[in-house]
Amino acid sequence: MKILALTKYFPPDIGTASHLFFELCETLVRRGHEVTAVTSLPRYNLKKIPAKYRNRLFLKEEMNGITVLRVAGIPSPRPEISRSIEQFYMALPLYFCGLAAQKPEAIIVYSPPIALGITGYLLGKKWHVPFIVNIQDLFPQCCVDYGFPKIIIKSFGKIADFVYHKVNYITVHSVGNREVILRDSPFVSPEKIKVIDNWVDTDFIKPGKRANTFSALHNLNGHFVVSFAGSIGIPQGLEVVIAAANELRDLPEILFLIVGDGVMREKIVRKASGLDLTNVQFLPMQPRGTYPWILASSEVCLVTLLKEISTPVIPSKILSIMAAGRPVLASMPLHGDAPKLIAEADCGLCVEPGNAEALASGILKLYHNPELRELYGRNGRRYVEEHLSREACVANYETIFQQAVKNFSSSGNRRAGAR
């Protein structure tokens, strides 16, 4: 089958979005499909943009059997501003970039940005093929959670309604996400929404030795490392980690390692500095190949979200921590799908969001109980191997592609499930 994948993020961009979709495309190629990825020229989380991508408006290349078509984004000295604008803007250049691809049999779109669903719709209409949207952030609810202005929330809501109505299938990564869409978009047929877990590459991330090259390079050996690795944005609410570090400042063997970049990084660094904390170490975003060693160097791995985040998101870093055989300690709303996953897998602890004392207490519980840490680590690794492997999840996508093409053809090019 010929498949067109639309995504704002793609390697060498560093982040969950880029690698999740790359792995989807790569695995589909291995399974015998022809895949073209339409995406932006790389910039996300990169300290230095590779020379071949600089000063280009368009580029065609091949990566692991995937034909990749790239188009330029918006240059800006402040990436967080250009990324916000591109939530709307990139739908247009990616549409024209997509026209350079061969006609596919099916289209899949990664959201965010949700506006990219319009691109999928327009290309699907032009070529008379079905399109599927993989929803990672629930619009407009995530905009409400992040405190966006009402006009932005309303705009995203209109776009989401249009995309949900026109799409052939919607895929989400948890049952809770499916329920939110059905609640907020009653016109969407339940048959249209399919739950496919996000996966983790268990060959790339696996249990490793705590004493390794990364831990030696950053003087981590001999410490009980409590790590957070990923985006340092508003939703993560990392203030609670700094406050917990302050609670545990009299135990210098416990070291908080915060790895990553984002709009809140400077504020978090200033807060740690203002408290004169010597038990917190910051590192910038690391290359993807380093990520398994960050997890391996850790005794406990943190996942945090603000209490205001009401969408039942499962941060992908939870799956990576489980694959690394390390215990998860989550500070996040307890009603979401992530705490349910952690409880089902029995791979860690969850505490209420924003509660530094509870987070510090969870760290101490794991600090004093190495057997419990090992148990949680083993359980997490076993769970992802059995339920969240890359091959099994991509096979589910393959089934949806086949069903979408079949339904589209048999219904005279009507959208499956549309009313």
Image (tube, rainbow, N blue to C red):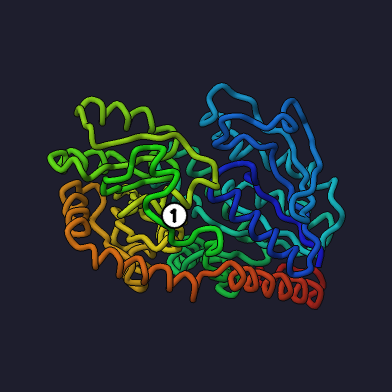
List x then y, in percent, for residue 168.
68, 66
Tell me residue 383's x, y (percent). 43, 73
- Tally of marks: 1
Q: Which of 150 and 268 is in front in this view?
A: 268
Residue at figure coordinates x 73%, y 43% from the top left: 94
Q: Locate the N terminus by quadrant.
A: bottom right
Q: In this view, does 309 lie above or below 403?
A: above
Res. 207 in view? yes
Left or right: 116 as drawn, with respect to 221: right
Residue at numbered disc 1: 317
Q: In which quarter of the image is the C terminus?
A: bottom right
Tell me residue 307's x, y (percent). 29, 50
Q: Is residue 62 left or right of residue 322?
A: right
Position in image of residue 151 (x %, y %): 48, 38
Considering only vertical position in the picture, is 363 above or below 230? below
Q: In the structure shown, which secondary structural element does the residue marked by tag 1 occupy?
A: helix
Q: Examine the rendering and report whether any part of residue 313 can be seen.
A: no
Please name the residue shown 26% across and 29% down the image: 271
Picture quadrant of residue 397: bottom right
Front one among 312 and 88: 312
Q: Classify residue 203 by image quadrant.
A: bottom right
For label 1, the crowd category at 10 Å Cα-Cα, with few meaning under 14, some 14 to 19 and many 20 or more, is some
Q: Quadrant of residue 194?
A: bottom right
